[in-house]
Structure formats: structure tokens, C-alpha cells
Amino acid sequence: METVILAVVIALVVILAAGGLVVGSRRRKQLPPAPPTEQPTITAPPAEPHIGDEAEAPRDEPRRTIEEVELPESEDASAGGVLVEERPAAPEIEQPEPTAGRLVRLRSRLSRSQNALGKGLLTLLSREHLDEDTWEEVEDTLLTADVGVAPTQELVERLRTRVKVLGTRSPADLRQLLREELLTLVRTDLDRTLHTDGLPNADGADQPAVLMVVGVNGTGKTTTTGKLARVLVADGRSVVLGAADTFRAAAADQLQTWGERVGARTVRGPEGGDPASVAFDAVKEGIAEGADVVLIDTAGRLHTKTGLMDELGKVKRVVEKHGPVDEVLLVLDATTGQNGLVQARVFAEVVDITGIVLTKLDGTAKGGIVVAVQRELGVPVKLIGLGEGADDLAPFEPEAFVDALIGS
């Protein structure tokens, strides 16, 4: 029995040993071949070709740090090697056209758009028989020209009386008659000078004259302020501009451009800032610089906005802490006709208007607005605008104006 067991054990050992040899031989056959001992060669990417017929062979150049790279020298470099920034050239100071007789020189421009009034009246008055229908036509002509109801009635009554007394009516006589009556309406007795002579302050020091420019949006107020600066410079005055229209982004830039053209400095504040503060600082700078005139451009306000109109009154009160305001000029668009009288009335209630500036009188405006606005406010028209040119703002001269209305 023991012999049989021993024989079985030996047989099992032999079988297991034979199986291990077979498995080992199979594993050796599945192993991949050993890698070669030499290292593979790494090929560099081809060099970029250069412009030309043939590409050059790439060259190995040593890399430089940023400190080693030399910058090209600038032609504007100073001796110390510091680059000099090129600044824009200062604007050339212009010499404005003299204001004396400026309206006479612009007479042809005024007469082209305004003499329909004068010619119409002369034609009617030249009729052989001046009946009631003719006088009604005279009234209609005057009313259409925005003269106003009361002034029209006064003029017609005086014309009827004088024509009856005159008897024969030659063209020269009629023209002289109409000229005299229109001058009476326009009024030659009003003081139309700009008060630009400042008074000494409490300390006895010279104080610049302060002129405020007010008006409704769209009347050309800022442009008029710039043109007025040219008028003053042309008359030998030194000017400081105050850009107190802080609600319109371009207003200060526009005013500064006007000032630079005639050598006037512009005091301005932040957009949306306090207009009264800017106006106060402008007068302060004018005093410090010894300027003759300080021109303050206020924001264009709708006459229906009570709060904004009250703010305009505040600007004037703050400026008067330095001294009195010499002029408050109301800018009116002559083409608005009777609506301009409504604007004028409201502004006069807020600030004391001392003079009128009528703009756009060269267009479709009616010359009679001069009469109407003076009658409404009791203050004179001092300046009129006759175009878009820089020197198209002229002092108002009643004689030259009436002569342009009725023609030669």
C-alpha cells in the first residue's frame, strides 16, 4: 500500500514539472524583441523660408535679453535721451473786424431779407387814392412784419395825418416820410451802448464789467457769446469767458474754441456742475487777471421751467457778491416772432434785462420784431446777428437799420 501511494506522488511531481516547462517556453515566445541600444535622432523642423529666390540656411543666433536690445533713437530726442512729446501748435490769434460801421457793411445782407416791409409800404403809399382799403393793407403789412398791434395803429394814424397834410406825394417825399416815422417807432433816443466799463469795488480796485448772456435753448446763445467776445476784443477790451452752461456737454468746448481764437481765457467747471459756482469763479479770475470784461454764458433754459428759471436768478445773485452785473443780455431768435415776446417777458421777471440781442435777422425774420420787443420790455436792442460768420454780430444802429428796410 505504501508503495502505491509513493508511486502516485512521484507521478504527480513529474506531471507538474513538465507543465511548468511548457508554460515558461510559451511566455518566452510572446515577449517582444529587445529595443536597440542606439538613441533615435530628433529632426528639427524646417526653417521658415525668406523672401527671395532661394531660402538661406537657418542660422543659430544667441538669444538676447530685453535689457540688451537697443531701441532706435527718436529724431525728437533731446540731448539727455528723453523723448519730447510733440504738442499741437497753439491756435493763431485772430484780429476781429472793427465794429465801427459793421452794420453798414452788412446792410446789403439785411436789406435782401427785410426790405419787403419798406417796399410794400412805399408801394401802398404811392397809390393815387389812399382809401380805407389801402390803409387796411398798410396795417396788414405792418402786422405781418411783427411790428405789433399797438405800434401799428400808432404808425398808421401818424401816416394818415402827414400824408393828408403833405398833399402831393413824390417818391422821394414818401420815402423820407416813411423813414422818419419808422425811426420814431424804432426809437433813436435809447442808449444802445454796451456798458463795458467796470466800476471800482469797495477797496478802490478796478473791477471788470460783468455781462451775463441769457436765453432759451436754440437761439444761438453760446455762439452769440463767442461773437460778442470778438466784438469786445475788436474794440480793444480784454475778456474772460465763463462757461456757466454746465448742462450741455459741448457748450464749454464751443465757448473755449471761440475764446482761443481771440486770445480770451475760458473758465469752466465739471459737466453737470453748479453754474453759479462757475460764474463766481469766472468773475474772480477776471478780477485777478485785471480783465476789462467778464462774459458769462448761462444755460439755455425753457421759459416754462420754473426751477431752471429760479436757478438763473441764483447765478446772478452769486455773481453780485463780487459786484454789480453791468449787463444782462437776452438773446432772442428773430424768426420766432411774437413767441419771442413771451420768452422775453418771462426772462424779464427773473432777471433785470438791460439789452436785447436779435439773432437770425438775415433769414426769414420780420424786421418789425425790433419795435415789438423794445415796446414789450422797455429796453433797447443792442446787437443783431446777420449771418453765421464770426464777425456777423453788429451793434444795432437805428438809421442803418431803417435805411436797409426801405431801400435806397
Image (cartoon, helix red, strand yellow):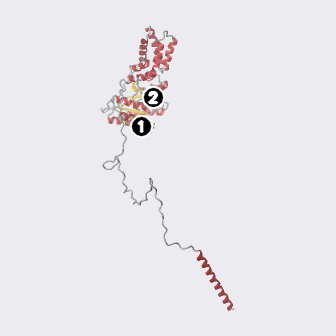
Q: Which mark is residue 158?
A: none
In this rendering, position of residue 338 left or right of residue 261? right
| Placement of 124 over or under 55, stated as above or below | above
| Residue 265 rendering spot, x and y as whole percentages | 36, 36
Q: Residues within 10 Å of mark 1 (few under 14, many from 20)?
A: some
Q: Is residue 367 visible?
A: no
Q: Is residue 144 visible?
A: yes
In the image, 357 versus 359, the foreground residue is 359
Q: Which mark is residue 347?
A: 2
| Placement of 144 over or under 79, stated as above or below | above
In the image, 20 versus 246, the foreground residue is 20
Q: Residues within 10 Å of mark 2 (few under 14, many from 20)?
A: many
Q: Which residue is mark 1?
A: 253
Question: Which three-letter amino acid code belongs to the residue tagged 1?
Answer: Asp
Can you name the residue that lies furthest to the right here?
Answer: 1
| Residue 214 rendering spot, x and y as whole percentages | 43, 30
Q: Secondary structure at mark 1?
A: helix
Q: Quadrant of the C terminus?
A: top left
In the image, 124 versus 379, the foreground residue is 124
| Residue 66 rendering spot, x and y as whole percentages | 39, 56
Question: Which three-letter amino acid code belongs to the residue tagged 2?
Answer: Phe
